[in-house]
Image (tube, grey):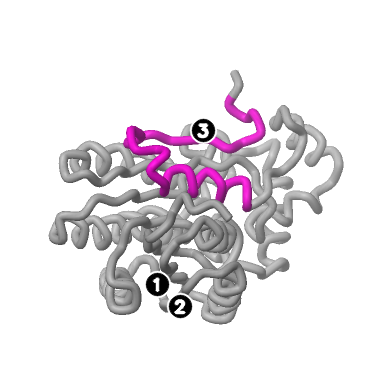
Amino acid sequence: MSARLDGKVAIVTGGGNGLGRASAIRFAEEGAAGVVVADLLEAPARETVGLVEAAGGRAVFHPLDAASRDDNAAMVALALERFGQVDVLLTAAGVSHGAYRSGDADIARKRMMESVDNALTPWVPFLDLTVEELQAVLDVNLIGTMLAVQAVAAHLVEAERQGSLITIASIMAKSNSGPVPYNVSKAGVWMLTKIAARVLAPRGIRVNAIGPGYVSTNMTAAIKETPPEFLVPFMAQIPMGRFGEPVEIANTAVFLASDESSYFTGEILHPDGGFYTE
């Protein structure tokens, strides 16, 4: 077994499924001394804890409302209590829209079909967008990322420790095509990453982003159920012709969490199947 993260302690927000779960498991496989699996949904997060332990690691669940400053502070406190340190943060908690609930296939299908129906009239969802919908997505994706980064960075600065903070942005962070709340939130995550990287670099804290393409998770499952007239041109955007797998994003997270990326900060890596090849 390799040990690229030997002795490091990681916090993973949104660790109950998808990219967060895959990353928590990969961190354990690479020798992490402990993983805090933070998520709003307890049952899947505890499943991840079990999978981390099955991979030979140590893990603990933390209930997390990503937009709560207190929850994020308690998350760091739990890591210190159980494992004595924090070295790595991965912010995988995220939503695609205000009503998003991980694993709720009915809501996902409904939203996807609305996107298909509005394909020829893209101004309709833009003009109908409410402040409440925008805020709901920003609260989790952007505010939640900021609070987690602040909480971990504050500890590292106080403890005079180095660390690697990894945010999950998206290919949509650089795209003007897609749902406004999601794209705007992920563009904000990317800018937040660059600013945090610049101000924290003198303290030995690296901050980088991962901008995944389309990956097979609960969030994207409904895309594959759309009519061929939508799905075929959609898939044509991806030169490799397939969705990514969560472990492929997790492998990127392992690189950024490890000392192999010691001269990386303020960067965004795109495991996206060639989406950005123009």
Q: Where does the image place residue 198, in percent across and percent down from the top left?
A: 22, 36
Q: Secondary structure at mark 1?
A: loop
Q: What is the CA distance from the residue labelled 2 to the residue labelled 1?
A: 13 Å
Residue 95 shows up from this direction: no
Q: What is the CA distance from the residue labelled 1 to the residue labelled 3?
A: 29 Å
Looking at the image, is 182 positioned above or below residue 23? above
State the residue position of label 1: 65
Residue at 58% from the left image edge and 26% from the top image edge = 276
Q: Amino acid under label 2?
A: Phe
Q: Nearer the viewer, residue 151 or 226?
A: 151
Q: Nearer the viewer, residue 221 or 52?
A: 52
Is 19 inside the magenta-drawn segment?
no
Looking at the image, is 219 positioned above or below residue 172? below
Q: Nearer the viewer, mark 2 or mark 3?
A: 2
State the residue position of label 2: 61
Label number found at residue 176: 3
Asked if marks 2 and 3 touch (Cβ < 8 Å), the reply is: no
Q: Secondary structure at mark 3?
A: loop
Q: Amino acid under label 1?
A: Asp
Name which of mark 2 and mark 3 comes first in the sequence.
2
Q: Where does the image place residue 273, in percent across and percent down from the top left?
A: 66, 34
Horizontal side, residue 230 vs residue 211: left or right: right
Name which of mark 1 and mark 3 comes first in the sequence.
1
Looking at the image, is 37 positioned above or below residue 200? below
Q: What is the CA distance from the residue labelled 2 to the residue labelled 3?
A: 36 Å
Q: Amino acid under label 3?
A: Asn
Q: Nearer the viewer, residue 82 or 17?
A: 82
- Which residue occupies the extreme right position in the image? 228
Residue at 61% from the left image edge and 73% from the top image edge = 54
Horizontal side, residue 34 vs residue 107: left or right: left
> Magenta span covers which residues?
247-276
Q: Where does the image place residue 217, in percent across and percent down from the top left?
A: 66, 56
